Image: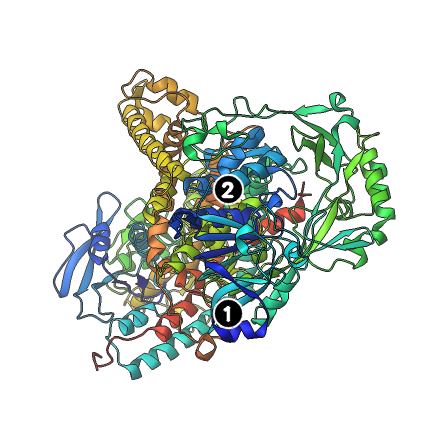
Amino acid sequence: MAVASPHGRSARAIVRLSGPRVERALAAVLADAPPRSRGVHVRSLRVGDRLAVPCLVLRFVAPASYTGEESAEVQLPGNPALVERTLASLLAVDGVRLAEPGEFSARAYMNGRLTIAQAEGVAATIAARTAEDLDAARRLLGGVTGERYSAWAEAIATLLALVEAGVDFTDQEDVVPIAPVELRERLGTLAAEIGVELRGDAPAGLGDSARAAVALVGPPNAGKSTLFNALLGRRRAVVSDAPGTTRDALREPLDLSRDAPGAPSVDLLDLPGLDTATHGPIDAEAQRAARAALGTADAVLHCDPTGRFAPVEGVPGSVPTIRVRTKADLPGQSGDGLAVCALDGWNLGPLRRAIADAVCAPAGSMLPRHRRALSLALRGLEEASALAAADARSLGAPELVADALRGALDAIGELTGHITPDDIIGRVFASFCVGK
Amino acid sequence: MPEARQRRVPFRVSERSYQVIVIGGGHAGVEAAWAAANLLPAGRDAGGRAAPTVVLVTLDASKIGVMSCNPAIGGLAKGQLVREIDAMGGLMGLAADATGIQFKVLNTSKGPAVHGPRCQSDKHAYAEAVQAMIRSRPEIEVVEGSVERLLVEGGRVGGVVVRNEQMANGQRANRSGESHGSDLPFAHLPFALSASAVILTTGTFMRGLMHTGESKTPGGRHGEGAAVGISAALRDLGFELGRLKTGTPPRLRRGTIDWDALDPALGDDPPVPFSEMSGRGIGHRASGISGEGWEALERFPSLPQVECRQTRTSPEAHAAIRANLHRAPMFSGQIESVGPRYCPSIEDKVVRFAERETHGVFLEPESLRDDSVYCNGISTSLPTDVQDVIVRTMPGCERAEIVRYGYAVEYDMVRPHQILPTGMTRRVEGLFLAGQINGTSGYEEAAAQGLIAGINAARFARGEGEFTLGRDEAYIGVLMDDLVTKTPVEPYRMFTSRAEHRLLLRADNAADRLTPVADRLGLLGTTALGRHRLSLFERRRRDLAAIGAAIDATRIDGEPLDRVMRRQAFTVEDLRRAVAGRPGLPGADSPAWATAHAERRYAAYVERQRAEVRRHAEMERRAIPETVDFASLVTLRTEARESLARFRPRTFGQASRLEGVTPADLTLLAVLVYDRPSASRGRG
């Protein structure tokens, strides 16, 4: 199985499946019966208990497929959260795994679907892909992100070594296994760090409650409510020329799929103009509510007709911000930002797409492979922590804690390079006087 | 024997040929001979006498099965190996049970997957027990002598040339050499033994060199010689050799230790044996083995149990070590080869962990028959005067007499990328290597390799296919796979953390994992012992089924017992109490209880590991054709190509564990080495 589409920005994602378990894998993610016959089938993806998302399934029957095996291509909305969930469900199926680079072509060749000449091309392509992948890995490891990942891998390896020391070297009186309380503490710190990385990069959620919130912010009378109505395509907010007309935060679902096919709906928030000069208790109350709402926003439309975009208090730096130069119909304007005119609808389409991009592929967006690796690592750490939760003086089941940590380490090792059992044993020798 | 070979060196042709020749009577050698014997029943010669199929060549038959270092079997991860060897009808577990004087399961405060059964054996009794077992087999003949040459023709081994010093000196042959023509006119000449498979288990004897301080003595073990010819023979055949080092501590006289003043270290009461056969009803007469300890098969433990003592090194000793480092072979440059990090000498410990003022030492009696005590923790090759200081400054040992000083030994090994996971060398067909020659350390690791080499040598001799165990099936599989995919930097020792499927590979379920495998191979049906093992295994299956049914039928406070059992605090005892009274349950002594408990305890994790195994199964077992010339695959990255060319993996699973080989390299490799059935079916 492999994700065949570029991550993040695409309107739809494509997941390719090949091999004898295609049907079983499809059954695990589709709300309806998996198609068996060759062709294009409209189906829906099961998301959670009740939600279903429409998708297309292109089914190929062996040997008439690219790989020569039973295979399928699932086209789904390009929402990273949805893609990730679908991948997770597929990988949970016994015998399903992620394809190695070039593996589909390799299988095609081995199943006689490619000629010798084509196969040489395949080999060259895979070799190039390998070089590219290694290059990408080198770039990653050379960068700030890579440093962070490597530091986590190191930290997990150290913890694993401390736990393994308490398993494999307990006959050594000089070895003092790690105390549960210390393990939990260090696991907690690590999990929190990785959690922040994942959340800081969280794709839009699914379902009503988890819809991404996009807030309109900017100085009073920047035309936020006008834009709010224009984006929704209906008059929902009261608009006037007087600054501070909007007193209450408004929240309305916004469908982006017309301009950004496959993109999820978001909640659009119209907030009272955030203004340091208060105009009495009612205003103060409204502003407090606005700030609270702003704190929950997944993305921000910063509206400013002047194009100056002075910093807005209360918007965290990590939240993706789209600068919108409103009232673009007024003469004499220039400056940064996407110029829109809410009155005639100019550039509203590009703005909707920008919103979709912002919530689907936030700043510094993570490759799905990275997200998956970090999520698995985090899961391993949390599991290890839970297994050690009840232990007081020493770990009761260090073999299970180690198993969970090993899972975490292998997951992050996909990004930073595999850390072998030999490496772990080496760390034990480096930290303890082992030997009879 | 072809004439061409006889002309090169004068030697007599033995009147007998065998199917398997085992060289070396250590823990690898005896296990190899035993396994081969289980597969190769003795025939009858013209006179109606048993015609052995396996010959064991050793320098000194009285040293067969000797414990050169610590007289202990098992321990963490090693205990699992012993149980696995035993489950496959091996020799080590039975010999240890028959001669154990202290039994202790290590790590019992942790989960059952990492419990490590260990015993200390009476070292004299152990060697005798092993010798009795070997003697009990009409399939095995023991020949004394040193191997001078390997007979190789056309890349295939045909036998060995053995020199026997006593015969060469015109003396009457030793107790086992009669059949080799010592009464013939050419008795002084080396003689040839022929067989289609040869297993080399040289231990520390290949160019063995012992060090104590500045003094160096050729030899593989205290008081014994070295094997010199075989190193040169292997080099001549093109093998790449390496050199490793190991060491042993001084032994003390128990009567000179203030024994009662020291803290005791006790074994388990009741002791738990390695083998499910021990104490479970086959008479030694039925087994065919005679000698001391063999009533262990009916009554376990058969020897009285002993206590150990604990003491520690002193700051004065550490100071003396520091002052004498220039005389320590490890530091003076006299020893250049690498020793094991997990078993450092006391001088190593003092240097590397300078801040520690003391290190713990266990005093372990080596035998009921003499009062030799093993000092577990102070392995050393320091000069004798420094050893005196180290020992005499340990509390309770102020007047202790050193029976034998510690020493280090350097020895030749064959870099293990040159063997297959069966133990057979790639270079010479029919030639197998097992034990320390492959760069491992430990009796158990050696025995495990002996078992695999013995099985495969017998199969090779019979023209049958290879037998290997997977990493998900046994620690033995992990061991063999590690040997052929890693570059050893130190003597290899098993650890549970080496096994990615540790929760599946437990000491308690070794029989479930491997006895059926051994039975299919034919290791068990040929002997009374093996058949008894099979009948006990049948009983074990019934016991497991009965306990399983009882668990499924039981609820505790409304909660299914199966769920309650997943909790850490729920013990085997709790299980027995919870299902007490249900029908068909075995007695409390049944080993099935531990397995039933562990299976449920780990159910969720085990299922996950099994799923992981299945996920990679296709890749793991997919073969790489033997004929592939990795060096010619220029599309591969240089690093991957070099690694593959050196290790020449046989499966994609092995290839995936090589350093410098990425998943993408494997995909490319799959395309490059794929042998297309037909080139015409392209989709064009």
Q: Which three-letter amino acid code belongs to the residue tagged 2? A: Arg
Q: Which three-letter amino acid code belongs to the residue tagged 1? A: Val
* B559 relative to B224, above or below: above
In this picture, residue B415 sits left or right of residue A44: right
By what rule are the colours in the image chosen? rainbow
Q: Residues within 10 Å of mark 2 (few under 14, many from 20)?
A: some
Q: Which residue lies furthest to the top in this view?
A: B581
Q: Which of marks 2 and 1 is nearer the N terminus?
A: 2
Q: Do the residues labelled 2 and 1 touch (CB within 8 Å)?
A: no
Q: Position of residue A382 (x, y in %)?
A: 46, 41
Q: Residue B135 carries which label?
A: 2
Q: Nearer the viewer, residue B379 or A138?
A: B379
Observer able to see residue A359: yes
Q: Where is residue A87 in the image (x, y as percent from the top left)?
A: 32, 55
Report the chain holding disc 1.
Answer: B
Q: In which quarter of the image is the C terminus of chain B?
A: bottom left
Q: Which of A93 and B201 is in front in this view?
A: B201
**Residue at left offset 68%, top offset 52%:** B220
Q: Which residue lies furthest to the left in this view?
A: A37
**In front: mark 2 or mark 1?**
2
Q: Which residue lies furthest to the bottom in this view?
A: A117
**Residue at left offset 33%, top offset 24%:** B561
As helix, strand or loop, the secondary structure at mark 2 comes to: helix
Q: How far apart are marks 2 and 1 (CA)?
A: 29 Å
As helix, strand or loop, the secondary structure at mark 1 comes to: strand
Give residue A331's quadrant in the image. Answer: bottom left
**Residue at left offset 36%, top offset 26%:** B564
Disc 1: which residue: B152
Q: Nearer the viewer, residue A217 or B409?
A: B409
Report the chain holding disc 2.
Answer: B
